Image (cartoon, grey):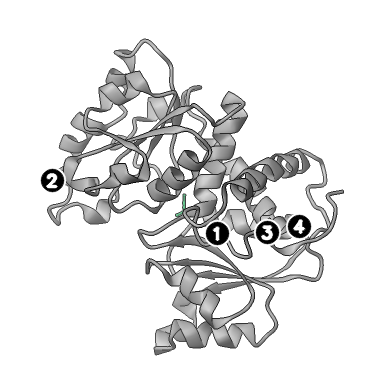
């Protein structure tokens, strides 16, 4: 493994991405055991720094750390000295002085994860930094695709929604393209960055064409906080043109795989009948999230054999 940290999949070598995913399957097997715990990270100290809300990622990292027998500390910015004006640098250097092996951080500012590597010499794992990257989300998405299809190379993957503001979209693009998948993005033209084709992805503005082309689609959450500020004119209009609705899916003969990173806005970007159908692998993505985060922490921090 060449990587010392996991900041983003843009900078992670292809072989390391494959190893994170493949080792994830070994941990997935451990998660099926009656006692879901291995001693791999005994004696390692991990701090989870969450400066932004999270359900899946926070719980998933905590479970992954506990199942690897690490010692963990949870930090929430809302109850910390950040509220008194303490900077990120001072916060992390004080935490680091307490002898920490790894920091898992979610932060609203793009680039904050790489910035941490300048302040401390612990392993840094990015749990989502603003609109930049969410690498463990993309790893769990790719693990779920590999589990379903057997391989990622040659798969046709559509990503639908607000591509411009999505760290999930960017990390998926970097990872999928490195592993040989074909990727197309789809959404309102003003929510797709100009020049995105340079990342070796196609652009499709018609979601029905995308569904006909794809083996699987990853549907992004429409961020309600962006509505009413001129970015998304109305929920109804978005749903009509880009929503993965019951009616739309009935018109397509093929049954593609449906993915969503969560949290879901039911009735906006996806209807309940699709999110809860057999073609959706959304909850499997969540389970694989624990396994792939165990893999990331194990490969970056541990030297023990899997038992
Ligand atoms: N997918 C994801 O990052 O969800 P949370 O914001 O709940 O962690």
Q: Nearer the viewer, mark 4 or mark 3?
A: 3
Left or right for 107, reference 150: left
Q: Could one spot residue 97 in this view of the protein?
A: yes
x and y, in percent, of residue 106 in the image: 48, 65
Q: Relative to 110, say whether 164 is above or below.
A: above
Is 293 placed left or right of 127 in the picture? right
Give the structural element (helix, strand or loop) at label 4.
loop
Left or right: where does residue 58 sit relative to residue 66? left
Give the x, y percent position of residue 30. 77, 43
- The residue under the point 76% across, 57% down is 68
Residue named by callout 1: 58
| Separation of residues labelled 4 and 3 (CA atoms) | 9 Å
Earlier-in-chain disc, 2 versus 3:
2
* Mark 4 or mark 2: whose residue is earlier in sequence: 4
Disc 1 within 8 angstroms of ligand 1 (CB) = yes
In three-dimensional space, the C-alpha distance between marks 1 and 3, rounded to whole angstroms, equals: 14 Å
Label 4 to label 1, Cα distance in Å? 16 Å
Q: Which residue does the numbered mark 3 point to in the structure image?
A: 297
Displayed quadrant of residue 5: bottom right
Q: Is residue 305 above or below residue 94?
A: above
Query: Mark 3 or mark 4, which is nearer the start of the sequence?
Result: 4
Label 4–label 3 contact, CB within 8 A:
yes
Residue 23 sits in quarter: top right
Q: Residues within 10 Å of mark 3 (few under 14, many from 20)?
A: many
């Amino acid at each position: 493994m060449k990587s010392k940290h996991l900041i983003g999949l843009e900078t992670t070598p292809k072989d390391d991405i494959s190893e994170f995913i493949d080792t994830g399957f070994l941990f997935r097997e451990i998660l099926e055991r009656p006692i879901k715990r291995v001693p791999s990270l005994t004696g390692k100290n991990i701090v989870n720094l969450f400066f932004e809300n999270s359900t899946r990622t926070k719980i998933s990292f905590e479970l992954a750390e506990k199942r690897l027998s690490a010692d963990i500390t949870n930090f929430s910015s809302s109850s910390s000295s950040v509220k008194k004006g303490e900077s990120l640098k001072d916060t992390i250097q004080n935490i680091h002085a307490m002898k920490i092996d790894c920091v898992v951080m979610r932060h609203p500012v793009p680039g904050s994860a790489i910035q941490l590597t300048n302040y401390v010499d612990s392993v840094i794992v990015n749990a989502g930094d603003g609109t930049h990257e969410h690498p463990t989300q993309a790893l769990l998405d790719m693990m779920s695709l590999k589990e379903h299809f057997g391989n990622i190379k040659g798969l046709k993957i559509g990503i639908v929604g607000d591509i411009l503001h999505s760290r999930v979209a960017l990390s998926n693009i970097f990872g999928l393209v490195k592993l040989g998948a074909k990727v197309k993005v789809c959404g309102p033209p003003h929510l797709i960055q100009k020049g995105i084709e340079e990342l070796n992805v196609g652009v499709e503005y018609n979601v029905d064409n995308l569904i006909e082309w794809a083996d699987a689609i990853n549907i992004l959450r429409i961020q309600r906080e962006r509505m009413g500020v001129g970015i998304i004119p109305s929920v109804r209009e978005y749903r009509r043109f880009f929503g993965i609705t019951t009616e739309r899916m009935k018109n397509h003969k093929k049954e593609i795989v449906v993915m969503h990173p969560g949290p879901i806005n039911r009735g906006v970007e996806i209807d309940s009948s699709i999110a809860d159908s057999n073609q959706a692998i959304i909850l499997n993505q969540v389970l694989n999230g624990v396994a792939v985060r165990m893999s990331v922490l194990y490969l970056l921090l541990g030297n023990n054999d899997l038992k």
